[in-house]
Amino acid sequence: MRVMLKISGEALQWERTHWIDPKFIHELALQIKEIKDAGHEIAIVLWWGNIFRWVAWAANWLDRTAADYMWMLATIMNWVAMQDALEKVWIVTRLVSALDIPEIWEKYIKRRAERHLEKWRIVISVAWTGNPYFTTDSAWVLRWLELACDMVIKATKVDWVYDKDPMKCSDAKLIKQASFKDVIDKDIKVMDHTAITLAKEANLTLKVVNLYKQWAILKAIEWNKEWTTICD
């Protein structure tokens, strides 16, 4: 099975207030190794929340295009660290980027990325789509479609999906299953509306799991419980 992982950058902080917890990223690399050893091809997209979490503040003075490029660079920093963690547990990886910086990675080309997956390399996609105004949500749905992934796992720092932020609202209600139409109509904060629309039109299925639960990602791939499923 070809699996895409969308990992929250903020989750990489673990108990820190910012940046990356080295112990946790090592444990995450071991989780990913377990998935690979179970016979699954893996592509990964990562957010940037552990480095830049100041959207409202930046909007007061920073041009949106400039902010988006800074956030793309933030995903790059996360993935250089993630690649290092994966290679320390003997996993061959390839960084593929929508931005052209050949000293660090190769340019994203669909057929080349597919070939890496066929050779059992983990493909790490960075820098979104390479365009401002398109978020990481749009990027991972696009890569999901281009690489013909069988399943997408969104790994975050909370259990399930809720109708409100459970970290801020004590009355947040757990959602075990929903359609993309529900996500749009009820404004459930899973991903932005552009990405939701694209996923809905392609009839995709998304599973949302708690990254901090041991082996949560592998369980979501092979079992049928303990996550939120979003599909039509």
Image (cartoon, grey):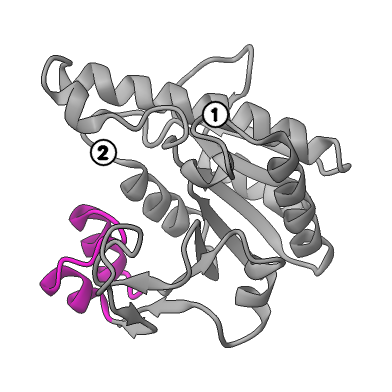
SS class, disc 1: loop
Identify the image quadrant of the N terminus.
bottom right
* Image position, residue 215 (x, y; %): 71, 67
Prevailing SS of the magenta stretch: helix
In the displayed structure image, the side of residue 189 where residue 124 appears, left or right: right
Q: Identify the image quadrant of residue 86.
A: top right
Which residue bears the numbered disc 1? 19
Where are the magenta residues, as a range?
Answer: 179-203
Sequence-wise, the earlier of marks 1 and 2 is: 1
Question: Quick check: is 194 in the magenta stretch?
Answer: yes
- In the displayed structure, 177 sits above or below 157; it is below
Residue in the picture at 42% in, 59% down? 145
Q: Report the residue that reaches farthest toward the right.
A: 90
**What amino acid is labelled 1 in the image?**
Trp
Identify the image quadrant of the C terminus.
bottom left
Residue in the picture at 21% in, 63% down? 197
Residue in the picture at 53% in, 39% down? 125
Query: Which mark, by number, is residue 38?
Result: none
